[in-house]
Amino acid sequence: MNQQHTGSHSILIVDDDQNHVTLMGRRLEAAGYDILVAVDGLDGLNQAIHRRPDLIITDVLLPKMSGFQLVEQIKVNPETGTIPVIMMSAVYVTDEDMMRGVELGAESYMAKADLAMRKPMQAEALLEAVSGLLGKVESREEAPASARILVADDDPNTVRLVTKRLLPEGFQVDSASDGQQVLDKVFDSAYDLVLLDYKMPEVDGLTVLSRIKERTPGVAVVIMTAYGSETVAMESLRRGADDYLIKPLDENEPLPTVRVNLEKARRKRELEDAAAQLRLSSSPEYEDKERLIEELRQSSISLMEQYDRLLAAEEQNRAYAERLEQMVEERTGDLKRRTQELSVLHSVLSAATRSLELPEVLDITLKEIGELLQASSAAAFVLDQVTGRLRLVTQKSLPEDFLRWVSKASASSEELRQVVETGAPLMVDDFEEREGFSRLSGQAVCSILVPMRTSSEVVGLMMAACTEHREIDDNGWKLLKAIGEEVGVVVENVRLYENLRLAYLSTIRALAEAVDAKDSYTRGHSERVSTLAEATARELGLAPDEVESVRDAGYLHDIGKIGTPDSVLTKNGVLTSEEMETMKLHPGDSHRILSHAQLSESIKEMIRHHHERYDGGGYPDGLRGDEIPLGSKILAVADAYEAMTSNRPYRDCMDVEDAVRELRGHAGDQFDPEVVEAFLRVRDKVEGGGAGS
């Protein structure tokens, strides 16, 4: 029979078929409803948000936004998510269409053809569906949301956020901070839904979930887990979770999820109640069978629809779990590959930042690239700035004739030239057809060429040869390019460092020559001291950078004499005590002059203390023994020997034999004995003969 609605509910019809809108609108207006009309999906969404109809009827095929998209947007919006939606289609309604509509949140899905709006009985079906859905809305409004919700999380910030969002909606909200407390509260009190964190103290979230579903299966449970935990979400669904949320939560996230899952739980209870009532109908004690049959007939369509929705939701969960499992497998593989790639890049970056020794950096880089590409051999070349040829720096297991060819063919080989000119990595195979690469036949099937480049130019080339063909995806090529760029920076830094070192050495020599020029008797003194000190440092086993520092300190050890009066420096006779005190100032003056120079502190300290004595009687600070820097001890011996064996204004040079006796005679008081012996071992090599040691 035709139902007359006496309220003032508004219904929004979203359809671009004017005839259908007119027919449906007349039926609904005749039943007492106010009608709103939208002719496309965007207009429908806009009216849903701003005019808040009590119910929405939408076509599937719409301009600007499909009916499915419209339903999705309506249901995810907390302000419109509770508006019931009926979806309609002018074509045959498939199970997939219905499932999709239900998944998105539509309360009903009907076919326009089945309605046959001109036929009263089938038009009545639409009116009954509308009346039923609006009746449920009214009952919810009359009894505002009073569902009991337990927020279970040991993070008070999450509890506060969720509670703040749910309380204004009329929900009763309680909280628990550990797993055992959750179980105690759920088993002692009646909760409709539990928002449960996966990581809980005392009893973990999955165990709590399993126990709740065993004892109180009617309680909806939504798992909260951290971003990216697809495995946790999948396992939660398998154990019976109704849904899950990804943390950190947005302020508006919990409400739609809570409403949807409370509604799912309510519908499930209705279905179970109907099933129980059906079982009761077969009991002889049940007398009013006629009334029951009528009730069941009235609710059968609704119950079957709800049952279908539950089945669809169950199927959706299974499909979702399968998708999650596949996603986890894919992401696990991606993660392993990405981890390996990041490990390679980390090793290269670490080598590049801790060392300016190019062979060391390239050895590490080739090792990492070799492992990444499972290469059998590899090599690294730098591009000579003068000749334009590739110069071998390091290699592993590549044929000598191939390496020689690479060095010579930098400009003639199409492949090598392409990499150098474009700065892009390249894979070379078909060796028999490639000039020069045929030398690798029998040893490898492909070679990957990786340019070492700076922001402006290619400065070198790395290559790896593989015994099996390699498939390299976009990320792999990007990684190889990034490695080449990092190593290119190292090559450029080494070049800059070498240029600075040469300029620095030139400056040092110029300063030393300026000092020596003040006294014709000491011309060349600084260079000879530097040479002797460098050889002694190497003999004592100092590290290469320490040997360089001793050498440079030798050049500059007397720079402070620039401020010493010529009358003192070139005096033809013994210095007075006052003049000697003036002369003793030059180590400190050297240190002050060099204090702002771009020199290491060790060089400055060597120079300051090169007139200290082993027994503590030297100057300027009276250091003794191990207090004196080793470099200073070396300079002291080299300086004394060179002074004794050179002419001075006040005396002639000493014989080498006498100078050696002087050094040994003062070993232990003026000089470090170990340094003296090391000096005497290398003196002949440096000076090309002389008295034996």
Image (spheres, rainbow, N blue to C red):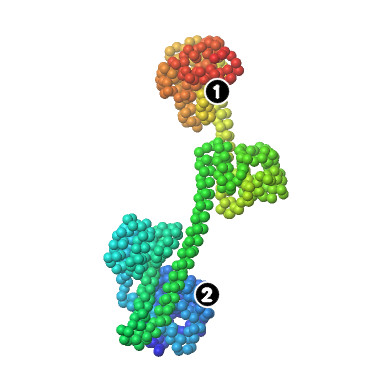
The answer to whether residue 183 of the structure is visible from this angle is yes
Q: Given contact means CB atoms under 8 Å apart, are the residues at marks 2 and 1 in contact?
A: no
439 displayed left or right of 269 = right
Amino acid at pointer 1: Ala
- Residue tagged 2: 63
**Label 1 neighbourhood size at 10 Å, few (<14), some (14-19), many (20+)?**
many
Quick one: SS at disc 2? loop
Amino acid at pointer 2: Pro
Whole-percent x and y of residue 372? 56, 47
Residue at 58% x, 51% y is: 477
Whole-percent x and y of residue 597? 49, 30
User: How many circles with numbers are drawn on the protein?
Assistant: 2
The answer to whether residue 158 of the structure is visible from this angle is no
Task: Using the image, determine if residue 544 lies above or below residue 95.
Answer: above
Residue at 32% x, 84% y is: 284
665 displayed left or right of 418 = left
Q: Earlier in the sequence, mark 2 or mark 1?
A: 2
Q: Quadrant of residue 255?
A: bottom left
Quadrant where the N terminus lies?
A: bottom left
Residue at 58% x, 47% y is: 374
142 displayed left or right of 658 = left
As drawn, the label of residue 535 is 1
Q: Nearer the viewer, residue 12 or 282?
A: 282
Quick one: SS at disc 1? helix
**Label 2 neighbourhood size at 10 Å, few (<14), some (14-19), many (20+)?**
some
